[in-house]
Amino acid sequence: AQSVTQLDSQVPVFEEAPVELRCNYSSSVSVYLFWYVQYPNQGLQLLLKYLSGSTLVKGINGFEAEFNKSQTSFHLRKPSVHISDTAEYFCATTNTGNQFYFGTGTSLTVIP
Amino acid sequence: EAGVAQSPRYKIIEKRQSVAFWCNPISGHATLYWYQQILGQGPKLLIQFQNNGVVDDSQLPKDRFSAERLKGVDSTLKIQPAKLEDSAVYLCASSLRAGTSISEQYFGPGTRLTVT
C-alpha cells in the first residue's frame, strides 16, 4: 500500500537559514510524490511534484525537493527561509492519481 | 481563474445534529474530492467523484456520511447524525481528471466543523 512518513512534526528555524523537511515513502509500484503547503485557515497549495524525469524538482517560493529511490525519500529544501514560509507542509503520494495519501504534516516555524 | 469555493467556512453544531457542506469546484474540473482533516493529521480522502459518478468512497462512513454531485458540478457532503469525533476541517479539492493521468489537485479553504 502507498504511504508517506514525515519524520518531523515541528521544525523551528531562524530566518534566512536553510531548512529541510523530511519525507519517506513506501511503495512497491510506480510512485508520484507531492509537497503541499497549508497556511493558517487556508486550503492546501501545491509546492512541487515529482512524476518522472529529473530527480531534482523545483517548485514555487524557492523550494525544491529531490527524489531518492535508493533511500525512498523526497525531502523538501529551501536555502534561505522567510517569515512568510511559516506554515504546515504535507508530503503526499499516489500511484494512480485516484487515491492520494498524505503524511501527518510538518509545522515549519520561522523565527525572526 | 476562480478557485474552489466552499461554504460555510465555520460551523458549530451539537452531537446528533445534522450538517451539510457545499463545494463548487473550478470550472471544467471533472474530478472532485472530499477530504477530512483532523487536527494534527494529514487530509484523509472521504470520497472522490469523476463527473457525477463515485470513483472511491471506501473511507466514507456511510452510516452517517453522504455526498452527492448532481450534474457533475457542485457537490454537497452531509453528516447525519454528527458525533464528537467528526470535529475536523472538511476540504474539497478538484482536478481536471484522474485515473489515466496525474492531475494537480486544487483545494478550497475548507469548512471547520466543531461538534459539541
Image: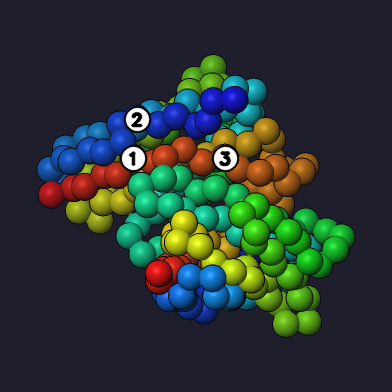
Does residue A8 show up?
yes
A78 on left or right of A11: right
**Depicted A57 relative to depicted B116: above or below:** below
The residue wearing badge 2 is: B7
How far apart marks 1 and 3 lie (CA) works out to 15 Å
Q: Chain of mark 3?
A: B
Secondary structure at numbered mark 2:
strand
**Residue B88 or residue B48, whichever sits in front:** B88
Q: Are marks 1 and 2 in contact (CB under 8 Å)?
A: yes
Q: Which residue is drawn at the image coordinates 31% and 51% (left, top)? A: B88
Q: Please determine if labels 2 and 3 lie on a single subunit.
A: yes
A79 on left or right of B33: right
- Rendered image quadrant of residue B28: top right
Q: Chain of mark 1?
A: B
Q: Are marks 2 and 3 in contact (CB under 8 Å)?
A: no
Residue A41 position, x and y percent, is 36, 47
- For residue B106, the mark is 3
A74 on left or right of A19: right
- Rendered image quadrant of residue A94: bottom right
The amino acid on which the numbered mark 1 sits, given as a three-letter code, is Thr
Secondary structure at numbered mark 1:
strand
- Rendered image quadrant of residue B96: top right
How far apart marks 2 and 3 lie (CA) works out to 16 Å
The residue wearing badge 1 is: B111
